[in-house]
Image (tube, rainbow, N blue to C red):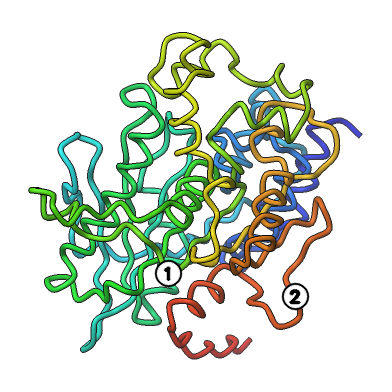
Amino acid sequence: MTTHRLLWSAVFVCGILSGASSPAQTTPPSDDRLKQILKRFPEADTDKNGVLSEAEARAHLKKIRGGKKAENPGPVSTAATPTAPAPTFADVHYGPHERNVLDFWKAKSDQPTAAVVFIHGGGFTAGDKSKARGDRILRECLEAGVSYAAINYRYRTSAPIQDVLRDCARAIQFIRSQASDWNVDRTRLAAHGGSAGAGASLWLAFHDDLADPASSDPVLRESSRLAAAGATACQFSYDILEWENLFGPSSNKYQEVDDRPGFYGLKTDEELRGPVGQKLRADCDMRGLISRDDAPVFLNSGMPGGEITSRGHLLHHPLHAKAIYDRCRERGVGVVAQIPGVSIEPGQDDPRNLREFLFKYLKVAPPPAQAAPVN
C-alpha cells in the first residue's frame, strides 16, 4: 500500500475524516486517535512539539499526495472542536521582552484556586500560547474551578536556553505576584506542555527555587517552584553533550553539532566544555537537577523506541522520558509515566492521564462526569 493510502487509511479509521452520512454525525478526533497517527507518521508533527493536531494530519496528507484530492474519502467533518472562552486577561506582560506575555483564565471560585500553566512547544524557535485555546485540559480546569494560564517566552534566536527557561520561571513568579488580584493559591501551581514546553515544565519542577528575597523586583522575590508538572514528548536534558551518553554517537548526525555553543550563548567548543560551559550545562540538565524534594511529574511519550530514524524521532524518543522516569524513581520523586515505546505504563493505583494527575497533586476534585448523550 502506498504511503498516501496508509495515511489516508489512518486518518479515515481514526475519525479525523469520516464516512458518516452527514457532517453533523461526525465528532472531533480524540487525543488517542491522533497519537496513533503520530506514531505511524512522526514527520506529520510539523511544529515538532510531540503532539499531532488535526490540521497537521490533514496538511501531511495533502503534502504527500501532492495536493491531489483523496480517492473516495467520504464527507469531511465540519464538527468544530470545542474552544475555550476568551481569557480573563490577555497578553499580560510578565517581563520586559515583547514575547514575555501570558493569557490568564480566572476560574469562578469564592476561594483561592489552583492554577495550571501551559508552556508551548516548537523547539524554542517557534510556537505560541494560542495553542492552549484548543486544549482539553484548559476547559477541564475551568470546569473544575482551576485557573489556567498560557505563556509565550523568548525564542533561542534572541536568547540562550538558560535565559529562555528563566522566562518560564518568571512567568510562574509573576502569577504568584498576582495571587491576590487573580484569586490564586500560591501553593498550588503546576505547569505542562509538549516538547520544548515539556522540557521547560520539567526544568521548573526540578530546579532549585529562583526566588530572591533581596531583589528590587517584586516578581523575582516570588517562588518559582511547582506543585506538579506534566510533560508530553519531553527531552531529558538541555545539557546537549549528555545526549550522546544516552543515545550513542550515532545520534550526532541528527543534532545541530556546529550550533552547540550557541545554544548557551557561547562561541566555541572550548567554552562549551570549559568551566563556564560546564556550569551552564549543569543548570539546564533536568535529569541532573532531580532531588528528593522536587515536584511529582507525569510523563507521556507516544514515539516508538528502537533505532533513531530522524531528527524528530531523536527529539522525542521515549528514552528521554525513561531517563527522567528512572532518575525520579532513584531519587524518590513522584512520577507517573505512559511510555509504551519502552513498555512503561501507570501503576494500577496511579492517575491514568495528565488531568487526573494534575488534579490529584493540586488537590482538586474533578468536575462531575457528564451524562452520555441520548440518541
Which of the 4 image quadrants contains residue 3? top right
Kindly give the residue lying farthest to the front in the view shown.
Answer: 275
Give the residue type at disc 2.
Gly
Residue 375 at x, y percent in the picture: 63, 86
Which of the 4 image quadrants contains residue 344? bottom right
Kindly give the residue lying farthest to the left in the view shown.
Answer: 216
Residue 2 at x, y percent in the picture: 87, 30
Give the residue type at disc 1.
Ala
Q: Which residue carries the number 2 mark? A: 347
Q: Provide the secondary structure element on which disc 1 rests.
A: loop
Which residue is more in the foreground, 125 or 334?
Answer: 334
Which residue is more in the foreground, 143 or 297?
Answer: 297
Residue 81 at x, y percent in the picture: 49, 61
Q: Is residue 49 above or below residue 334?
A: above
Q: Is residue 109 above or below residue 337?
A: below
Q: Is residue 226 above or below residue 251?
A: below
Q: Residues within 10 Å of mark 2 (few under 14, many from 20)?
A: few
- At a point 69% along the width and 53% down the height, the residue shown is 35
Q: Which residue carries the number 1 mark? A: 227
Kindly give the residue lying farthest to the right in the view shown.
Answer: 1
Q: On the rendered image, what quadrant is the N terminus found in?
A: top right
